Image (spheres, rainbow, N blue to C red):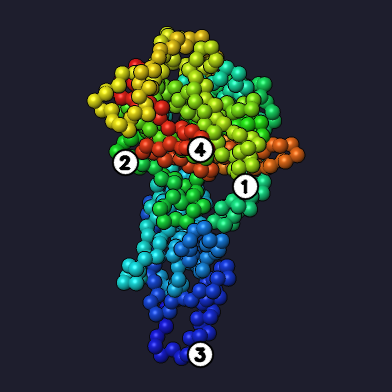
Amino acid sequence: MKPFTKRTTYLPLVLILLFINSCSSSNGKDQKISNLNPFRFQFKLKSIPKELKGERISYTLTFYSCSDIQASDCYSPVSKKTYNVTKPLQALSDQINFQESIPNQWTHLSIRLEGIEKVYGKYSPGHNPFWVQNSDSYLKNSNITHEFTFVSQENLIPDRKQEELASKFAPILVFHKDKKYLPTNIEKYADFFQSKEYTLPNKDIRRKSLGETTWNYVEFPDLRESGKQTHLYYHVRYAKSTVSGTQDIALPGFRDNGNYWYDFGNGDMVISYWIWYDWNEGPTKFGNIHQGDLESYALLVSKEGKPKRILLTGHDHILLDTDFRNINSIKNHPILYVAKGNMGSDGGNPTSAYGGYTVKLHAGNALFNYISDPWDVFPSFDPENSILIIPKDVSDKDLTSVKIGPGIIDTSKQTSEDSEFENQYVSTRYVDARKMIKQRIERLVAWEEPGWVGLPADKDPDGHHKVDTRLSSFFRFQGRLGKHPRSDLRIRELHQYGESPENAPFKTNIEQHYTFESPKSERSHTDREGNYGPKFIGNDSTPQK
């Protein structure tokens, strides 16, 4: 669209402006359009996958006026335009240039590349949509350029290395001896896999950001008495990895779990683990009851495989992000504790790096706090009252004298801030845990990249993406796992049915978003009473060799 000249008469100018405004506004917002300084747009495509040869692509520009992201009309575009590329893609690169008038008032612009569905989940073009935030610089230089460069979403860390790392840091899990629902596996549900739809809650941000009104779930039969083998699911990636929609300037709710990419960075890696429970009952008898539960933790390790940090999630929070030396471990296997609830409930299965303490949780409001009084009650490392699920490579001999506590501390580095840990330094104990063994982790399962399941590799050094047929449906599925896909408060029953978990590995709920982060700084969550933070500060002597 060419800029208007000064010779344009008043009446035609008004008519043209009205026409442009009516075509540009997709949701009825009345915004003025600039007519003196049209913006120049230049978009490039590089490393176009061969699967897109012959496809016709387009670019959609969506402008928002959203100074307050909490505002109810924040996600209503002030202008939306689509530019179709006339010729189908034929080469490894492509480019488009055009001019266009834009709204006078806008804060965010999303640039979405469309027509690339054939490679979705296989090749990433980077952030899509790519976000631009308005600034004074555009008054001086009205150019917006962006380059979409496609990269394979295959994991370039060899399978053998991934498995070695995942096995090396598999957890020693501690439970109360009367815990009803121990971790099992999802493969036993393979014959019952059938995707269904449910209506998204009105407050779900995807209604505003993506226009989604429904989402997917899988309802499983109650098979809690069978298939009790414990499997551990893992995914190893480079720490410098990115998910589309996580730009700092992006409006919330545009995270795209199917579009992500890996960068080698400094070689650090993140090992993410998921632990499957058939049932979540707690943290009180009143609620959060739902079928299916995927709890997770992640480790940051150096390119040499040395542990640096651990990150634990639960209850839609980062519960703990700390130095690996601040927790107990045996031969690199972290000792992790799984909570029960109170009032006799089996608990919501949150995982902590410390035992023998409680955290009182917020139930949503003061009334529910009073009625249900939810707690996480973490077991102690105690042969009389606790049981263990351990990795296969941990022997009975390894558990003869398990160090619980920080061990020897370097008092020269202790500060006044460490005073709260003073008693912990002298309370280190050694426990014979051989009689605590309940069962072992029977199998470690690598979570394959969903878009590449069952396909020959392009860049992957292993040359294939073979997957157990019992797992392929789970790996490809985006949605919730369990018969309770959304929260449901039933006052007559005095029960709160919570949401079944989003599928791994790139889950859309807040809790699992954290597992895609790199453990990076001292963080812990504090609730109504208590916190999940470090119970001691360790050093190089703390990990048990």
Distance between the alpha carbons at the discs numbered 2 and 1: 35 Å
Q: Residue at x 54, y 56 (%)?
A: 209
- Observer-side mark, 3 or 4, equals 4
Q: Considering only order in the chain, which callout, 3 or 1, is on the residue closer to the N terminus?
A: 3
Which label's residue is closer to the chain start, 3 or 4?
3
Q: Position of residue 19 (x, y in %)?
A: 54, 79
Q: Amino acid under label 2?
A: Gly
Mark 3 highlights which residue?
A: 11
**Which circle's residue, 2 or 3, is located before the other in the chain?**
3
249 left or right of 71 in image: left
Q: CA distance from mark 1 to mark 4?
A: 30 Å
Quarter of the image for residue 294 reads: top right
Cα–Cα span, label 2 and label 3: 58 Å
Q: Mark 2 sits on what residue?
A: 265
Q: Which of disc 4 and disc 1 is earlier in sequence?
A: 1
Mark 4 burial class by Cα count in 10 Å: few <14, some 14-19, many 20+: few
Q: Residues within 10 Å of mark 3 (few under 14, many from 20)?
A: few
Secondary structure of residue under mark 2: loop
Res 422 visible: yes
Q: Extreme right residue here?
A: 492
Q: Is residue 54 above or below residue 506?
A: below
- Quick check: 266 above or below 110? above
Mark found first going from the N terminus, 2 or 1? 1
Residue 285: x, y in percent?
66, 31
Q: Name the residue beneath numbered marker 4.
A: 527
Q: Looking at numbered disc 3 in the image, what kind of residue is underneath it?
A: Leu
Type of the residue with mark 4: Asp
Mark 3 to mark 4: distance in Å? 64 Å
